[in-house]
Amino acid sequence: MGNAIAKFSRITVPAKPKTTFNVGVVGGGTSVNSIPTEMFMDIDMRSESPGELNKLVTAFQAIIREAVDEESRTRSVAEGKIDADVTLIGDRPSGETPVSSSLVQTTTAAVKAFGLTPSYGIGSTDSNIPISLGIPAITIGRGNSARSHALDEWVDVGKPSTVRAAQVALTVILAAAQ
């Protein structure tokens, strides 16, 4: 598994469209000095482009096969063959709702009505599923925050900012329902 992780970490992905991956969780074995009978790694792969994501998944699967073959050639398989079971544990398809869409334009107007400046970006959110199904969707930012997905992630939950965020969100919902 270490060989596979090392090989995977050397993959180069494009900055545009943004494509990322990480080995977020690894585990296995029963003690520091025993041969593990099982091990696992959880990998997160994302891209703004379905094509780039598919290329990354294909490269990962090839690396796993290669690492298993290399391990089988260099270790004893007398007690059983070495194999890998690649299982999809989550799927967040990529896509975007164009800035020119009525939903984005309505949201822009609502945000500006509160004296805020909208910004646009592509991210991995719950909006990805409807977008992948051809349903326009957006994710409204969470206001003053930083360090998403890090242990020190934070968001301002003070009453003034929370109330303002709720007002903006409700305005967007009511305006989009028209």
Image: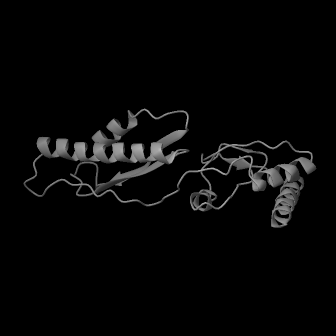
User: Is residue 24 found left or right of 133 in the rendered image?
Assistant: left
Give the quarter of the image for residue 147: top right
Residue drawn where x is 78% and y is 55% of the image? 102
| Residue 5 location (% of width, % of height) | 35, 41
| Residue 78 location (% of width, % of height) | 7, 54
| Residue 104 location (% of width, % of height) | 76, 52
Residue drawn where x is 83% and y is 55% of the image? 165
Give the number of callouts: 0
Residue sitting nearer the eye, 89 or 157: 89
Position of the C terminus, as image quadrant, is bottom right
| Residue 63 location (% of width, % of height) | 29, 42
Residue drawn where x is 61% and y is 57% of the image? 131
Residue sitting nearer the eye, 65 or 120: 120
Give the quarter of the image for residue 138: bottom right
Residue sitting nearer the eye, 68 or 56: 56
* Residue 153 versus residue 12 in the image, above or below: below
User: Is residue 172 found left or right of 48 in the rendered image?
Assistant: right
Report whether residue 22 is seen.
Answer: no
Report whether residue 172 is seen.
Answer: yes
